[in-house]
Image (cartoon, rainbow, N blue to C red):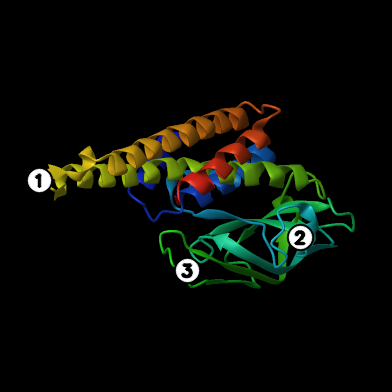
Amino acid sequence: LIVVLEETGRSLVPSPLVSTVIAARAIERFGSEAQRARWLPGLADGSRIGTFAWLERSDRLDPAGVEATAKVDGDRLVLSGEKRFVTDASSADLFVVGVRTGSAPEAVSLVVVGKDASGVSTDDYEGMDLTKRIGRLRLDEVRVEADCVLGELGAGAAAAGWLLDLGAALVTAEAVGAAEAALRITSEFAKQRVQFDQPIGRFQGVKHPLAEIYVDVESFRSLVYYAIWAIDQDAEDASLAVSRAKAYCAEAFPR
C-alpha cells in the first residue's frame, strides 16, 4: 500500500483511495464477519467509495469533540449531527461515522451509514486543492439498523484513534512520492538552466539546498515506513511513530 501511495502522491492522482482504505480497514478490523461480507467486496472491487467521518465543529481529534448523537430506538439507532472536513464526502457511498452513544467523554461508537439513507446529505467545501476534496456530512434523524455498529456500542474511542493514526500515516506516504517528484522536477531544471555559461546546478547556492531536500525526503520516508510497520504489527509505539513521521513531513514537505 505504501508503494502505491508513493506513486499516487508522485503524480497527484485525484483518487478517493486513502478515504476508501480507511473505511475498509475500519470494517475489516472492527466489524463482524457478517459486516465484512456485507461491505468489503464493494470497497475492494471499486464499485463503492467509503470514507471516515469524525471531525466536528470543535475540530478536536479526541472523543470529547464528538457531538453527533445516536439514540437507541428499538432495534435501530437514530443519528443526528454534522461532520466536517470529511474527505471525499460527496462521492462516498458509505460513511464510517463517529457518534456519541453515552454521556462519558469516551462513550462513542463507529456506525456505517449509506449515502442513500433518509436524512443523509453532503456538500463540498470550496478548496484550493481539488485533488483532495473535503466536505460536510449532515445526519438528520438518520435511522440505521443496530447491526451497522462496528464493535460494541460505546466502545469506539480506541478504534477511532487507530483509524486517525492510519490516515495520518497514509497521507504522509503520499507526501513521500510528492516530495520526490518536486525534487526531481527541480533537479532537472537545475541541470538545464544555464547562467554564467554553466548549469545552475553547479552553484553551491543551488546544489546544497537540493541535497538538503534529498536528506529530508529520505528522513521522513524512513519514519513513515516504520510508522506503517508499527501500525501493521500493533506495536506499542505505533501512535508515536505516526506522529513523528507526520510532524517531520508537515515541516519538511512545504519547505
Q: Secondary structure at mark 2?
A: loop
Count residues near mark 2 (Cα–Cα under 10 Å), then give few for <14, some for 14-19, many for 20+: many
**Along the line of sight, the residue nearer the viewer: 55 or 248:** 248
Q: Is residue 24 visible?
A: no
Name which residue lies at 57% across and 57% down: 94
The residue positioned farthest toward the right in the image shown: 103
Q: Which mark is residue 66?
A: 2
Taking the image as shown, residue 186 lies to the left or right of residue 129, namely: left
Q: Secondary structure at mark 3?
A: loop
N-terminal of the pair, mark 2 or mark 3, is 2
Residue holding disc 1? 197
The location of residue 230, given as percent across then percent down, is 61, 28
Q: Which mark is residue 127?
A: 3
Which circle, 3 or 1, is nearer the viewer? 1
Amino acid residing under circle 2 = Val
N-terminal of the pair, mark 3 or mark 1, is 3
> Decide: marks 3, 1 in contact (CB < 8 A)?
no
Amino acid residing under circle 3 = Gly
Q: Quadrant of residue 79?
A: bottom right
Taking the image as shown, residue 97 lies to the left or right of residue 172, namely: right
The residue positioned farthest toward the left in the image shown: 197
Name which residue lies at 70% across and 47% down: 160
- Residues under labels 2 and 3: Cα distance? 24 Å
The location of residue 103, given as percent across then percent down, is 90, 58
Q: Which mark is residue 132?
A: none
Count residues near mark 1 (Cα–Cα under 10 Å), then give few for <14, some for 14-19, many for 20+: few
